[in-house]
Amino acid sequence: MKIEPRIAEEKYYFAIVDESQLMNLANYLDGIVAIFREDEGLTAVVSEDIKDDIASLTDKDLEGPFALITLGAHTDLYAIGILAKITQALTREKIAVNAFSAYCHDHVFVPYERKEDAMRALGKSG
């Protein structure tokens, strides 16, 4: 399977927000790319446009910036080894990666300053 990586030009940040702020997060849906519930709270991945607003909803520092790379191939939720292949390619280049699998595609967040290196590494991996 050809992975066909595509990169978003925006910068993204990770935030942890208490679940009591969920309705407040709804006010910023245009700038939120992902929300995931963890025991510690809601992890929200947000665009740079709303990072200051989201920062006001949490007592923790936001992490970032990150670049979002979407794997263009329509990936099956039962596919085996796709993320392993991606993370191995990025590991060889010493690029940190945070992966997210959605219904249609897999996505990875890499440090923004390493985005071009990541695209080259993924291009080599197939």
Image: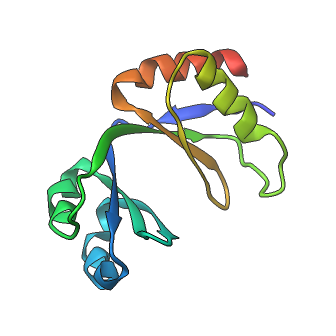
Q: Please, is residue 103 above or below residue 37 in the view? A: above
Q: Is residue 57 left or right of residue 88?
A: left
Expressed as whole percent of the image width and height from the top left, the position of residue 99 reads 57, 45
Q: Is residue 107 left or right of residue 76?
A: left
Expressed as whole percent of the image width and height from the top left, the position of residue 47 reads 29, 51
Q: Where does the N terminus fall, quadrant-wise? A: top right
**In percent of the image, x 20 and y 70: which residue is there?**
57
Quadrant in the rendering for residue 17 = bottom left
Q: Is residue 81 left or right of residue 105?
A: right
Q: Is residue 35 left or right of residue 123?
A: left
Q: Please, is residue 8 above or below residue 27 in the view? A: above
Quadrant in the rendering for residue 120 = top right
Residue extending furthest toward the front: 40
Expressed as whole percent of the image width and height from the top left, the position of residue 19 reads 37, 80
Q: In the rendered image, is residue 11 in sight?
A: no
**In percent of the image, x 22 and y 64: which residue is there?**
54
Q: In the rendered image, is residue 7 in sight?
A: yes
**In percent of the image, x 77 and y 58: which residue is there?**
77
Quadrant in the rendering for residue 124 = top right
